[in-house]
Image (cartoon, helix red, strand yellow):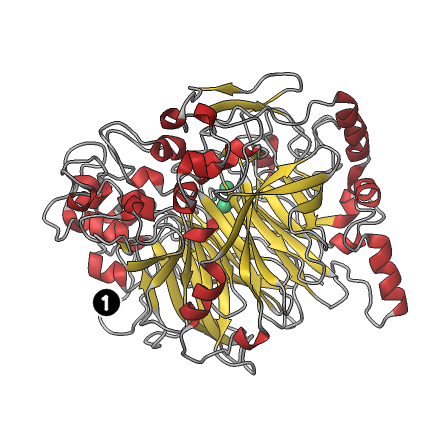
Amino acid sequence: MSSEIENHNDLNPSSNAPFSTVLARQLSRRRIMQGGLGMAAATMFAGFGLPGAVRAAMTQTGTQAPLTLGFKAISGSTTDAVVVPPGYRAQVLAPWGTSLSSAGRQWSPDMVLTPEYQAGAMGMHHDGMYHFPLNDADASRDFLLAVNHEYIDQGALWAPRNGPTNNASGARPADEVRTEINAHGVGVVRIRQNDNGHWQVVQDDRHNKRYTSQSPMILTGPVRGTDHVRTAWSPDGTRVRGTNNNCASGYTPWGTYLTCEENWPEVFINRGELSADQKRLGFPTDRGRYGWETATGGKEGEFERFDNTPTADSATGDYRNEARAFGYVVEIDPYNPESAGHKRTALGRFRHEGCWPGRVVEGQPLTFYTGHDSRNEYIYKFVSRKRWQAADANRPGETYDRHAIGDSYLNDGTLYVARFDDDGRGQWLPLTPESSIPGGGPEGAGTLGEVFGDLAGIIINTCDAADLLGATPMDRPEWGTVDPATGEVYMSLTNNSKRTAQGTEASYTEKGTDIDQMGVGYATAPVNAPNPRPDNEYGQVLRWKDDADSPTRFQWEVFLFGSAANEDPRVNRSGLTADNQFASPDGLWFDQRDSAGHGILWIQTDNGLDKGRGNAVAEATNDQVLAVVPSAMGSGNAGESLKRFAVGPNDCEVTGIFATPDRTALFINIQHPGNWPAMNSDDATVAADGAVRPRAATVVIQRDDGGPVGV
Ligand code: FEO
Ligand code: CA
Ligand code: CA
């Protein structure tokens, strides 16, 4: 997202000294990294996964040709248009405000949106997304598209009124708030490719549905039915209204969509004393991000629920616990519009960026990787207790109880947090009541259970529990993706202005000394092995692989460092040039092309200029999509391996990515563009003629000759 709603403050109060204090190790790693991508790959990937040499050998003995990027890399761009390589085209699809039905009003640039219209139309600020086939034969031409609507641009939303009413002070009008609420959430819409290769929204399809920040949702897992989540609207703590600030996405092997709640704390307030979890996650104390709590005239606490200040004698008389039903991975069944979203509390509660399934193996537990996008926060994984049964796999297009299958895998299992050791090894630390606290916890507590009571208490306070176990503070974990052939996981660490130099001490805005005071702010953390650059302006992509014989151990390395091309080699460690410089990696997708583990890693950026980071990369190019073939990195350098594939229009972030199963269409999202798309064309590469009301949209990129994208 843009800096508009970002709050990646240093909310980690842990007193763990980041582990990387061995200078010699650091220097030796630095020398390796300075050798450029190819050298880093050859040196550090040895011994895990399928390194380039092994993959090359497999290719030579097998039938599969080496995968190479077949497009002409493009230059950086700073225009009001999407840019794609020669021989490619890009189409705008399902922009904000597109009605899901053909009845009634349709979008127009001067439209004043109402709650009712927005509830039946695509929301704002498209982010994570995924595709759900209706049948196997047409899976690349006709499917359900699930898209997150992460947040709103009030300027564009209320453009015909010259902006929102009473945004900074005073009461917000109820219908403005309802419209804004309905512009958040998730959209499920059927899309179809015509014979001429053009894509369109299938209005009136029975699957088309909006989930908004008002839609009823079901709480599942350890937190369901506990005292933590009882409210006046759900006295038994089993339900909540809405999902909010849905950022990245994932999916399950049984055909459901996972949408992840990221920058949700700021839509709530507590005017009283903040609880530990509210402090840790960054609650406002005077006014919510959009002042939704100030509206009046709703029913059943429609607006009051955003104000979590205790007012009644007990939790079932007010909304003090409302926000404890947020911060989760939420499962949606796109095939069944009658079903409600299920919040999967077992996967932890924090600012979830996204959730990505690990390698799926019959008879083995399922793994889902997640990350907490705030400075110096952590990476997690959830391992199901139930072992995967192929009989549970998705049956495209059929309606049956996928949430019951989700219940069996996603409500019972173990949540782990990652500790990265500086020797390239790592440990997954279980967040369970029995887990011992190294060195002892606050007030003499020996286990997480003694601090937080039970698993539900651990989940509510996930980040504090992770501190106590000694997790490694990271440079803002964003998207992950998994190579399904090898199980290797990639994750973006986007940037971190609060990463300090080797030898400095971690600092805290207020260091907690007892259980009640936990959760109050890690101001800075010194460099450590996976986050080795102080004042990290450019970000990096991490790669790890869990050990085959142990769910708690893994091997890791930095896969790629972002940088401006003109930086010193101590910063530009992957040897990037003007042709492939990038900063703030965010969206990722591993695009498997064959069973030998060959595939393209697509990398999207959220760097920005005026609304983001004004670094040399932002001066040179708008946010972009890059591609690299990891299996081809045993030789060569970054200039040969990493290629710029697409660039977005001014002021946008590029996020959300997948390709059709036949790889002939790559879908990306353009979020918060400044002056795009053009009014009378759905060609994404056409710049607007004059000023337009900007609309986030999906963009479909295809080759003119209809061939597979990227190769
Ligand atoms: Fe919504 Fe961390 O990006
Ligand atoms: Ca993101
Ligand atoms: Ca981002």
Residue 649 visible at all = no
The percent coordinates of residue 652 (x first, y second) are 47, 45
Q: In which quarter of the view is residue 189 placed?
A: bottom left
The percent coordinates of residue 275 (x first, y second) are 32, 32
Helix, strand or loop at mark 1:
loop
Residue 279 versus residue 359 in the image, above or below: above
* Circle 1 crowding by C-alpha within 10 Å: few under 14, some 14–19, many from 20: few
The percent coordinates of residue 66 (x first, y second) are 81, 63
Residue 195 versus residue 69 in the image, above or below: below
Residue 332 visible at all = yes
In which quadrant is the C terminus drawn?
bottom right
- Find disc 1 in the rendering and name its residue: 105
Residue 308 versus residue 69 in the image, above or below: above
414 sits left or right of 419 in the view: left
Q: In which quarter of the view is residue 70 placed?
A: bottom right
Q: Residue furthest left?
A: 297
Which residue is located at x 77 percent, y 27 percent? 25
Specify the amino acid type for callout 1. Arg
The percent coordinates of residue 641 (x first, y second) are 76, 49
Q: Residue furthest top?
A: 504
Which residue is located at x 67 percent, y 54 percent? 601
